[in-house]
Image: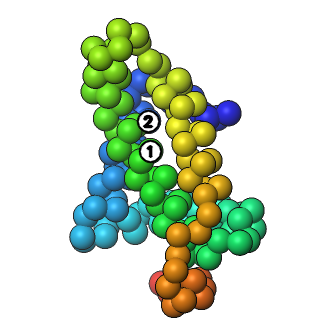
Amino acid sequence: QAMAVKPRSGNDLSIFMRLLGLAFSQSQGHLRKYLEEVYGKVFRRYMLLVNEAAPKLPPIELFWRVHFMLGAAAFSMSGIKALRAMAETDFGVNTSTEQVMHLMVPFFAAGMRAESGIDDPLLAGAQLRPRNKTPAKA
């Protein structure tokens, strides 16, 4: 199921994806820090599961592949209205947001199933380092 939670309005997904794109493109890091606080535990758990599901791929390659997927999803979903309009003009059919999301799934799955592209031993041996926990303020 590509979309487990239905947006409250037609623009929710697009707005969230724009926010996600900004979080990773802004050098200040405020938005990234906020998203880390809100979604960090879930994302780290997801990455652990991805690593378990693809044990033959180096962890750093999985990191990049997941971020390639996030980037593709953020780009596509943040500009979904424009992309849907372009597709309708070029092909004469309306593609719903849900249909676009279903089209993404095999694309992302193929990216995760691909053989490793790493030929650098340093990258191949890179392991995830534990994060330093900052002490809670009193």
Residue at the far left in the pictured view: 27
What secondary structure is marked by label 2?
A: helix
What secondary structure is marked by label 1?
A: helix
Q: Residue at x 28, y 22 (%)?
A: 86
Tag 2 and tag 1, C-beta contact below 8 Å: no
Q: Residue at x 24, y 70 (%)?
A: 27
| Left or right of 33, for residue 101 | right
Tell me which numbered mark, 2 or 1, is placed earlier along the sequence. 2
| Residue type pointed to by label 1 | Ala
| Residue type pointed to by label 2 | Leu
Q: Answer few, some or many: residues within 10 Å of disc 1's Cα (few below 14, many 20 plus, some between 14 and 19).
A: some
Q: Residue at x 49, y 52 (%)?
A: 69
Residue marked by disc 1: 73
Q: Residue at x 31, y 67 (%)?
A: 30
The total number of labels drawn is 2
**Quarter of the rendering occupied by the N terminus:** top right
- Measured in 3D between alpha carbons, the distance from the residue under mark 2 to the one under mark 1, in whole angstroms, is 10 Å
Q: Is residue 52 above or below residue 82?
A: below
| Left or right of 38, for residue 20 | left
Residue at the far top in the pictured view: 92
Q: Is residue 12 above or below residue 73?
A: above
Q: Answer few, some or many: residues within 10 Å of disc 2's Cα (few below 14, many 20 plus, some between 14 and 19).
A: some
